[in-house]
Amino acid sequence: MKDDLQYLSGFNCEFSSEDARCPGALPVGQNNTQKCPYGLYAEQLSGTAFTAPRSQNKRSWLYRIRPSVVHKIYQPIVDEAPRLVYDWDATHPIPNQLRWKPFDVPSRQAAEVDFIDGLHTICGAGDCRTRQGVAIHVYLCNASMRDKAFYNADGDYLIVPQLGPLLITTEFGKIRCEPNEICVIQQGMRFNVTVFGPSRGYILEVFDDHFHLPELGPIGANGLANSRDFQTPVALYEDRDTDYKIVCKYQCKLFVAQQDHSPFDVVAWHGNYVPFKYDLARFMVINSVSFDHCDPSIFTVLTCPSRKPGTAAADFVIFPPRWSVQEHTFRPPYYHRNCMSEFMGLIKGRYEAKEDSFHPGGASLHSIMTPHGPDTRCFETASNTELKPERIADGTQAFMFETSYSMAVTEWALKTCNKLDNDYNKCWEGLKKHFSESKTIL
């Protein structure tokens, strides 16, 4: 399927789209006309308070066949074995380094599991009701959502496919998101996910704010992820009368309402509050060409700010293919203790700091102030290799969800999934003492 998308010109610019089948569906000159073209209803979707500063105000106007209020009462979904978990006090805190082997994807022979049923929470912190915190999930599914839509009333989803493409139908149009691409579905946006076989990926959920491009500072006007490379859908309405389920996540609980028509009946829209996708291959790497290993913040694609200036509620960071050219420098990631929590995943390839033991579809968590860094083999190799310009991470894409929140790990991640690597700490056991008072290293 060819993408039918438009490129963003900036993260807070106005965009507009109308389905080609209904030219002139977008009103001209005002948003809420007495009678909309084609007998449509006008509906505003607000992602910020009405009174937010203009530079930060996010909203879109949707012109749809029926307003989204046309549905029956929401009823709680009772899950005897809850997969989405936000009770951060249910397990005991664990400061250890944690790593998971690739999470199992339901087989074709197993029961059908769609995107919603395949969500599993790994860790998180905070409270969605006070709009502070994050959660990290994986999705493990093998079936498409049929006559079912989902929206998150609590926050934004940043979706990172690892196995299999996703065709995401939104109220704004369709987005096909492949592995090595990401998609952001912002708070309140209804969507449906079609899969084409066993599918696996990661989700970063944020409650505090929305995702933004990081400031560039002395880097200048260009670099890292450029706004022109982000894409948003074009309008593509669906006028279909059928029994449809609307699943809502509200205050971290799931609810479902029935309605008699498709929710994807938006004929035209305009605004700056939109779903979007980004191809990670378009990231413009900034790196050292003299000495020292730069802090990983230079690899930030998107950031969600917290209420503390300069500190993110969450950053999405990648470690893409690049040149390594530093002189007199240990080039892999340095040993580190951090005031942030670092959750890593691997989309494809072999991560440079742990080439033999960290696999695509798996994950790791290094909690606040817990030390971590390259394994023994990486340290010994990088300490003794000839330093010359070389390519690293070709064919590889690792990423990190970094957050200022101290993360609690769920029972599913610790036990139920049966993927926790209990031998993770052994990757550092071979690090030897090299110190000698009589030895000087120049």
Image (spheres, rainbow, N blue to C red):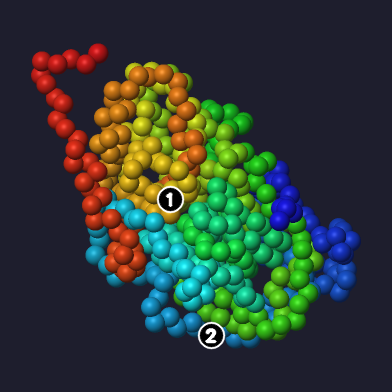
Find residue 57 and report its horizontal and vertical position in percent. 64, 54
Report whether 386 appears left or right of 186: left
Please say if 303 is above or below 120: above
Find residue 347 and report its horizontal and vertical position in percent. 48, 49
Q: Which of 424 and 44 is in front in this view?
A: 424
Q: Mark 1 belongs to which amino acid?
A: Pro
The picture quadrant where one finds residue 309 is top left
Q: Residue 438 carries which label?
A: none
Count of marks, rendered view: 2
Circle 2 residue? 75
Counting other residues with Cα less than 10 Å from the Cα at mark 2, is it few (<14), some (14-19), or many (20 or more)? Answer: few
Q: Residue 360 carries which label?
A: 1
Which residue is pictured at 56% across the width and 81% down the height?
Answer: 256
| Disc 1 versus disc 2: nearer the observer | 1
Find residue 226 and report its horizontal and vertical position in percent. 62, 38
Please identify the residue farthest to the front as the structure is shown: 109
Q: In which quarter of the image is the N terminus?
A: bottom right
Please identify the residue farthest to the left as the structure is shown: 437
Please say if 367 is above or below 131: above
The picture quadrant where one finds residue 136 is bottom left
Which residue is pictured at 40% across the width and 75% down the height?
Answer: 82
Give the secondary structure at mark 2.
strand
Give the secondary structure at mark 1.
loop
Q: Which of 362 and 270 is in front in this view?
A: 362
Which residue is pictured at 38% across the width and 37% down the height?
Answer: 352
Which residue is pictured at 79% across the width and 63% down the height?
Answer: 268
Does any portion of residue 135 appear in the rendered image?
Answer: no
Find residue 312 and report its horizontal and vertical position in percent. 45, 47
Q: CA–CA distance between discs 1 and 2? A: 37 Å
Does any portion of residue 21 appear in the rendered image?
Answer: yes
